[in-house]
Amino acid sequence: MISIFRWFLQLFTFVSLLFAVFSGALAQGRPSTCLAIAQSMPNVIYASAGSSNIFKVAGLANHEVRITFSGHSTYIIESEKGVTIATDFAGYAGEKVPRVVTMNRAHSSHFTDFPDPGIEHVLRGWNPDGGAASHYLQVDDVLVRNVTTDILNGGFYQINGNSIFIFEVAGLCIGHLGHLHHALTEEHFAKIGRLDVVMVPIDGAMTLSLGGMSELVKRLRSSIILPMHARGFATPADFISMLGSDFDNVYLKSRSFVVSLFDLPKRPTVMVPEGLAFRGYEE
């Protein structure tokens, strides 16, 4: 059953990518391919569409995405058409001003009240007016959407205080868990869909425990797992150990790498970027 689903997933994603290629541009308001697949197969563990090994760091070519670790919980995602996105943006993510930033409000290191006016789209993971934040935004060749979760902030439980942001680009589904504080429900998984790449907080204390985070990652079964939010309470090695022998791992010699749909790892792989450090600790 899983092998049949994997074949269907690869075929569907391949056809979707070819359509995007030959259409010349993606239409505004396009449907989420990552979400559509997920909702058609409830209660399935979603295998990603990987084929071979990666680790290119050359210039960006057609249908490739560059991912760069900027620090703490900020990753920079760059698309072929030049869209740059900074996750959990706290005011600075390098000299180049991103076109899109996402933010969460658990701590000041995950948001700013004074974003650069040159940023085209500021997406907060909470709704300042109350209720749940809701984002579904097309920016050139990238679709950005969110799934809200709850947070504990100063001892107070805040419903819909955090967002998991999902970026759909070049046929890839890339997810950033934000400052996740609790296990996800079946409804959350259904709303998230498939994630080929997932960015995971691994502090093990201020966010969901390492045990809880490893179970979540096992359920998502993403091809690439990118640690973030390393605050000295736990190490990437601790996280990797909890995932077990079904997951590979590699310590990158760079903060950046380039990936495409067609060269994802065959096995789920934890990729630890250079510079993942806090308070002098670095592996």
Image (cartoon, rainbow, N blue to C red):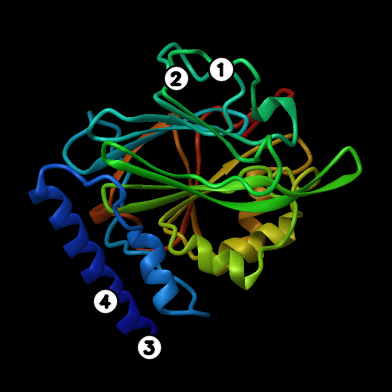
Q: Residue furthest front?
A: 129
Q: Which amino acid is tagged 1?
A: Pro
Percent from the top left, x then y, of residue 139? 33, 36
Q: In the image shown, does 265 or 117 lie closer to the viewer? A: 117
Q: Which residue is mark 4?
A: 7
- Asked if residue 186 shows in the view, the reply is yes
Percent from the top left, x then y, of residue 162? 67, 45
Front disc: 3 or 2: 2
Q: Residue furthest left?
A: 22
Real-space Cα separation, disc 3 to disc 2, in angstroms: 45 Å
- First in sequence, mark 3 or 2: give its number: 3
Residue 261 against residue 112 in the figure, above or below: below
- First in sequence, mark 4 or 3: give its number: 3
On residue 115, which mark appears? Answer: 1
Look at the numbered discs 1 and 2 and tell me whether their residues touch, using CB distance below 8 Å.
yes
Give neighbour class at mark 3: few <14, some 14-19, many 20+ (Cα, 10 Å): few
Quarter-wise, where is residue 106 in the image? top right
Q: In the image shown, does 219 or 120 lie closer to the viewer? A: 120
Front disc: 4 or 2: 2
- First in sequence, mark 1 or 4: give its number: 4
Q: Which amino acid is tagged 3?
A: Met
Helix, strand or loop under label 4:
helix
Q: Which residue is mark 3?
A: 1
Real-space Cα separation, disc 4 to disc 3, in angstroms: 10 Å
